[in-house]
């Protein structure tokens, strides 16, 4: 081991124990899977979602699984004033965020652009793009001041290849890709790391939300393929944030064995 390496903080799963991990959209899907994975690794968890009841149940389970402390906040990432007020007023013990997982995001509708609903576009752009920006803006300066921090943004295969009837959702994920690239450049020279985790099809409520509760239509999305599970993505995120401090995992494009890209599936 070189002198430089021996001076670094420990890496590997044990390195996350006792660190503060902030997860947005933590009440379900990939966010909740991350909460479980990081709880088992001993991280302190700051969990945000719009639904407090779900977070409260989750918090109790996470402490049993190994998290030393869990704090939940109600947060609608689309509301710039609320994001800044809520994060600005965090209790002292929760201000030093080590890892931010910008997971809050959604798709609404699957329509040709010329037939799309502007309210669906607003909801996706406000959550996936503007919400990610508001939370990042509130958290990164503290990371720079403390000289440590890692931002993990949830992208998608959709940000790498646009699919029909998904122009706006795909555009939000292409924006996430650009924002991650830009942030990585803007924090260069600080110890803050930036990772984009870009999954393909993951079996969550994603399609149910997209089709506004139409379970039958949502189930068809996953028919005939073995999709990724949210735990697969949580596993990748835990790995990315537990590399040695000099290693930045910039981007991980992750699909199931039955998916080659946004458009090509083995069904
Ligand atoms: C989710 C992947 O292809 O269902 O971001 O839009 S896809």
Image (cartoon, rainbow, N blue to C red):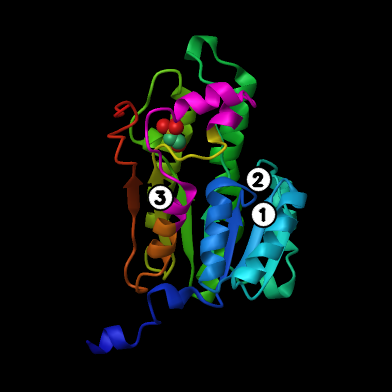
- Badge number at residue 48: 1
Q: Is residue 13 left or right of residue 52?
A: left
Figure check: 231 above or below 22: above
| Callout 2: SS | loop
- Badge number at residue 197: 3
- The answer, for residue 254, to whether it is visible in the render is yes
In the rendered image, residue 252 lying in the magenta stretch gets the answer: no
Q: Earlier in the sequence, mark 1 or mark 3?
A: 1
Which stretch appears magenta?
207-234
Q: Is residue 34 left or right of residue 118?
A: left
Question: In the depicted view, which residue is nearer to us: 107 or 219?
Answer: 219
- The answer, for residue 182, to whether it is visible in the render is no
**Residue at (68, 67) in percent of width and height:** 70
Please provide percent x and percent y for residue 5.
28, 83
Residue at which label 2 appears: 77
| Callout 3: SS | strand
Q: Earlier in the sequence, mark 3 or mark 2?
A: 2
Question: In the depicted view, which residue is nearer to us: 71 or 204?
Answer: 204
* Residue at the extreme left of the image, as rendered: 2
């Amino acid at each position: 081991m070189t002198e430089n390496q021996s001076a670094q903080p420990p890496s590997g799963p044990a390195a996350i124990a006792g660190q503060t991990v902030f997860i947005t959209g933590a009440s379900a899907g990939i966010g909740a899977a991350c909460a479980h994975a990081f709880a088992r690794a001993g991280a302190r968890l700051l969990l945000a979602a719009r639904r407090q009841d779900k977070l409260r149940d989750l918090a109790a389970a996470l402490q049993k699984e190994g998290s030393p402390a869990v704090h939940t906040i109600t947060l609608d990432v689309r509301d710039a004033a609320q994001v800044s007020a809520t994060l600005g007023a965090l209790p002292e013990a929760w201000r030093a965020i080590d890892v931010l997982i910008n997971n809050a995001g959604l798709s609404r509708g699957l329509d040709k652009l010329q037939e799309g609903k502007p309210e669906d576009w607003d909801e996706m752009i406000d959550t996936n793009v503007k919400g990610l920006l508001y939370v990042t803006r509130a958290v990164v300066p503290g990371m720079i001041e403390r000289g440590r921090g890692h931002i993990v943004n949830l992208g998608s295969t959709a940000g790498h290849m646009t699919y029909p009837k998904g122009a706006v959702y795909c555009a939000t994920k292409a924006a996430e890709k650009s924002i991650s690239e830009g942030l990585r450049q803007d924090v260069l020279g600080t110890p803050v790391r930036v990772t984009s985790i870009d999954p393909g099809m993951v079996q969550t409520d994603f399609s149910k939300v997209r089709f506004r509760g139409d379970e039958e239509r949502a189930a068809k999305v996953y028919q005939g393929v073995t999709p990724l599970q949210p735990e697969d993505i949580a596993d990748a995120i835990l790995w990315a944030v537990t590399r040695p401090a000099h290693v930045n995992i910039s981007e991980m494009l992750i699909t199931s064995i039955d998916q080659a890209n946004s458009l090509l599936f083995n069904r």
